[in-house]
Image (cartoon, rainbow, N blue to C red):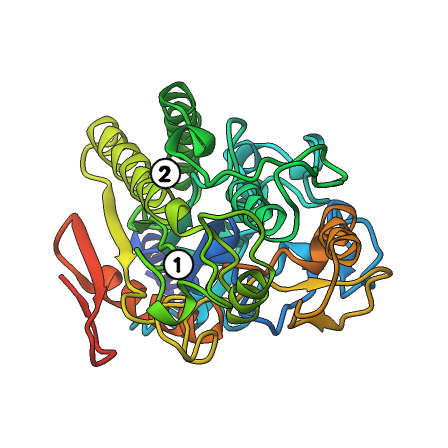
Amino acid sequence: MSRFRRTVVAVALAAATAALATAVAPAPASAALPTAAVALGDSFISGEGAGAYAPVVDVNGVAQTFPGWTAPNSNAFFCHRSVNASLHRATLPGIQDRFNLACSGGQPHDIATASSARANGRQVAAQLDQLRAVGRTHDIDLVLLGLGSNNSSFTFGDVAEKCANRFIADAWTGWWEFWAYLGGPVEQEPCTDADLATATQWSAATAETTTAVRQLLATLREIDADGQHRVVFQDYTNPLPFDLDPTFHSEDSRDDTRDKFRALGAERYAAGCPIHRASLLPGHRFSQGLGTLVRSTRDTLAAEFPGADLVYLNVQRAFDGARLCESATSPTGALATPIRLQDSPPNGVFVTSLAGKDKIAIQRIANTCVSYFQTCQESWHPNAAGHQVLGQCLSGAAATSARAVACVRASNGSITVS
């Protein structure tokens, strides 16, 4: 064989060997996506009440910063996504980035459909659309979900407004008078269970929430990079105790079972708990009902999505001993924001005392909350310290091997998740 031919054959063999090596060599591994924890749902997840609210991108892709106190409440900023929210306070080993997509006032409707498409919704895209955007750049390993307190049957804000206004109307007006409120006449009797939610409403709310979360789980199955993620279903904690500290039972020799008790009304407002004592137990049964709704949703979907990593996080006792008016020093030391209102026109200055104000002034202040809901929407939500506690609850739920855990605050302030 000539040198030329030997050279040609050698080159050919080398080329064939290289081609074979190329054919059988594995493709270069793509870079692993950074891991993410995502928060979805409503105000107890977004960080309402915790302050330090971040800009929120609206449906037009514009980041909305604080627009002023008289801006429409539909502005995306009023989703109130706080950097102090529990998602950001939790210890989450292995998580590289965190995304708060929750929105104060969020409803099941807002999971798959733009909030702007419903009455009183904020100008933000569907939370699933926002989640898909995260899924394109991150491996979603943890989802914190808070859903159920707002729905087409009832909302937390309406419940709180109803019971607080009944108390204020009772405190400042006589039985022969009426409360001139923008929403119409206000009763002066304490709230009952039926005033907060009926059996029919509970059933409808549970079905509505389950449908929304089913859509969420289906979307996660489609977009998650490795198909492995935990979803934590957090329920709700009541900002008020089962009974008020004795300091707030009466004032000026009048309690809240008689007609007109302005001094007591001013005292409870200053402490953050303008509420009839008789409304407290119905309020706690309402909170417990929300827990049942969330647990039922989780259990139903666990059966539909076998193998899915779904954890129910009960936080109903997370604020034990540190609720508003549970101690004589309230609101100091409480884990929830007191009810706070602004006068008209709203300017960011909160009214901390109603002492000495007459019925007309009280009505004007209360109506400011109706006209400009952003001036009072933080009321009765976890504050920054409360979200720090909820962050500890989330830390435990993220690490547990159990499918249901309870987060409880002890009398010394320590938090356990078990």
> Closer to the camera, 377 or 390?
377
Viewer can see residue 94? no
Quadrant of the frame with the N terminus:
bottom left
Q: Is residue 37 above or below residue 220?
A: below
> Closer to the camera, 79 or 179?
179
Closer to the observer: label 1 or label 2? 1
Q: CA separation, marks 1 and 2?
A: 38 Å
Residue type at numbered disc 2: Arg
Q: Position of residue 130 (x, y in %)?
A: 58, 47
Q: Position of residue 186 (x, y in %)?
A: 64, 36
> Residue 391 bears which disc, if any?
none
Quadrant position of residue 162: top right
Sequence-first tag of 1 and 2: 2
Element type where label 1 sits in the image: loop
Viewer can see residue 329? yes
Does 115 sit left or right of 347 as displayed? Answer: left
Does 180 sit left or right of 93 as displayed? Answer: right
Quadrant of the frame with the C terminus:
bottom left
Which residue is at a point 22% across and 34% down the rendered structure image?
299
Quadrant position of residue 149: top left
Q: Residues within 10 Å of mark 2 (few under 14, many from 20)?
A: some
Q: Is residue 46 above or below residue 347?
A: above
Residue that carries the numbered disc 2 in the rendered image:
221
Q: Position of residue 377 (x, y in %)?
A: 62, 55
Q: Is residue 172 above or below residue 390?
A: above
Residue that carries the numbered disc 1 in the rendered image:
240
Which residue is at a point 72% across and 32% down the rendered structure image?
184
Spot the residue most to the front.
Answer: 253
Which residue is at a point 45% across and 38% down the rendered structure image?
191
Q: Position of residue 167 (x, y in %)?
A: 54, 49
Residue type at numbered disc 1: Leu
